[in-house]
Image (cartoon, rainbow, N blue to C red):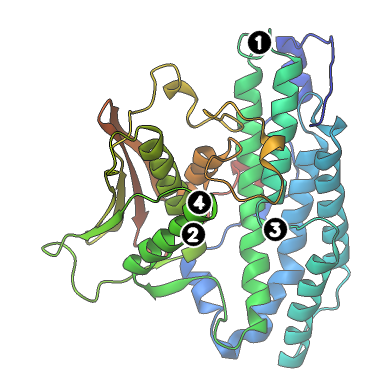
């Protein structure tokens, strides 16, 4: 486990000096789902490849600038510094790539970007490495500033920083994945206009079962329930499937953990995933029959680097798959949900269990929710 101790006291004045929200100077362009979908037209291959040259460097530089201005002592942690250097290096390399003018150039640019990502020692934009590295650094910082952690405003400052950094990471990964999709004949982008929400839920169930069984636990039944009176047989919606699946996997994983922790008798109660589609949005409701969220935990469930397991993020391991998490799951899930105008809320919690609600709007013109100071027309 990484260790760092410091006798430095963090004052309110130090908070302002350490971190000012939206400190980066990059002016980022927002995209709508519709724009990204349009660029998936095979005839617009060159235009899609221009994302690499026109927008990805901006987003990487914005993230790098924010990382360089990280609050408190985050830059003292090795994994955090590795992420900063990787973002800086990738941004420089992408900005030096030749501008594509033909379809062949576009495919070459996509392949080149893919190779760049594979060349890094750390799994950049893959498996949540950057998020876990941030969680470890925050946990270490919290440990070395226990006395003033909650009283000095450090938590609020750290959450603002982590939320903005996570949004910039999502925005960079979105365009990188969109650009690299040209390498796959059957997938020309990350947006699916006719994506069945039942498929999202089914993928979640499969992942959750594999996760629980890998850890040697009995897996509670996971029931996907469709509301036929409000859900047309062939209903579809436009979305980025990986965003929705991340949130659903986190919610179902937490529901399974709560169910296992509250197991009574030989038969485990099921976890339910209800899908309801209206004209404007699709709602996923995840319910468990656990013991509910303790009152002392409720104020922290949307905070980055908070975990109710008592396990330090570094003990989870950077590449280890676990059912418990490293403390960023719900906070990051809400960031994903909000990215294209959706929402994630705790509907209710009691001694009979908890219910979380994920809402995904259907509007193809929903735009990215980038940091306000980073948006450009």
Numbered circle sitting on residue 339? 4
Q: Position of residue 232 (x, y in %)?
A: 18, 71
Q: CA distance from mark 1 to mark 4?
A: 30 Å
Counting residues from the start of the chain, the first of labels 3 and 4 encountered is: 3
Residue occupied by mark 3: 125
In the rendered structure, which disc, 1 or 4, sits on the residue that comes first in sequence?
1
- Residue appearing at x 43%, y 63% in the figure: 206
Q: Which mark is residue 210?
A: 2
* Image point (47%, 65%), residue name: 241
Residue 94's image quarter? bottom right
Q: Which mark is residue 152?
A: 1
Q: Is residue 100 above or below residue 365?
A: below
Residue 231 image position (x, y, % from top left): 19, 65
Separation (CA) of disc 4 from disc 2: 28 Å
Sequence-earlier tag: 1 or 2: 1
**Closest to the observer: 183 or 157?**
183
Q: Is residue 375 visible?
A: no
């Amino acid at each position: 486990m990484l260790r760092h101790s410091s006798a430095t006291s963090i004052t309110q004045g130090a908070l302002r000096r350490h971190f000012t929200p939206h400190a980066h100077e990059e002016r980022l362009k927002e995209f709508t789902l519709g724009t990204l979908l349009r660029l998936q037209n095979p005839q617009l291959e060159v235009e899609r490849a221009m994302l690499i040259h026109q927008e990805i460097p901006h987003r990487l530089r914005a993230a790098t600038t924010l990382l360089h201005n990280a609050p408190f002592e985050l830059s003292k942690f090795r994994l955090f510094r590795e992420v900063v250097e990787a973002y800086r290096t990738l941004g420089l390399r992408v900005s030096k790539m030749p501008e594509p003018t033909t379809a062949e150039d576009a495919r070459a640019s996509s392949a080149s970007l893919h190779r760049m990502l594979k060349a890094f020692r750390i799994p950049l934009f893959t498996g949540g490495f950057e998020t876990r590295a941030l969680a470890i650094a925050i946990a270490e910082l919290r440990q070395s500033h226990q006395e003033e952690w909650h009283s000095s405003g450090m938590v609020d400052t750290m959450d603002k920083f982590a939320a903005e950094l996570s949004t910039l990471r999502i925005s960079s990964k979105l365009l990188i994945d969109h650009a690299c999709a040209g390498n796959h004949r059957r997938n020309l982008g990350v947006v699916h206009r006719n994506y069945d929400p039942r498929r999202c839920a089914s993928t979640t169930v499969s992942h959750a079962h594999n996760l629980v069984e890998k850890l040697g636990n009995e897996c509670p039944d996971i029931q996907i329930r469709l509301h036929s009176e409000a859900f047309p047989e062939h209903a579809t919606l436009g979305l980025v499937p990986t965003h929705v699946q991340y949130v659903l996997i986190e919610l179902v994983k937490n529901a399974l953990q709560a169910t296992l922790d509250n197991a009574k008798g030989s038969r485990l109660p099921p976890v339910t995933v209800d899908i309801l589609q209206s004209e404007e949005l699709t709602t996923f409701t995840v319910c468990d029959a656990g013991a509910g969220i303790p009152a002392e935990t409720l104020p922290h469930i949307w905070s980055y680097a908070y975990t109710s397991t008592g396990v330090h993020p570094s003990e989870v391991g950077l590449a280890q798959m676990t059912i418990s998490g490293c403390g960023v799951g719900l906070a990051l899930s809400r960031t994903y949900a909000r990215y294209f105008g959706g929402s994630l809320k705790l509907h209710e919690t009691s001694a009979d269990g908890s219910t979380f609600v994920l809402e995904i709007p259907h509007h193809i013109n929903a735009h990215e929710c980038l940091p306000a100071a980073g948006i450009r027309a």
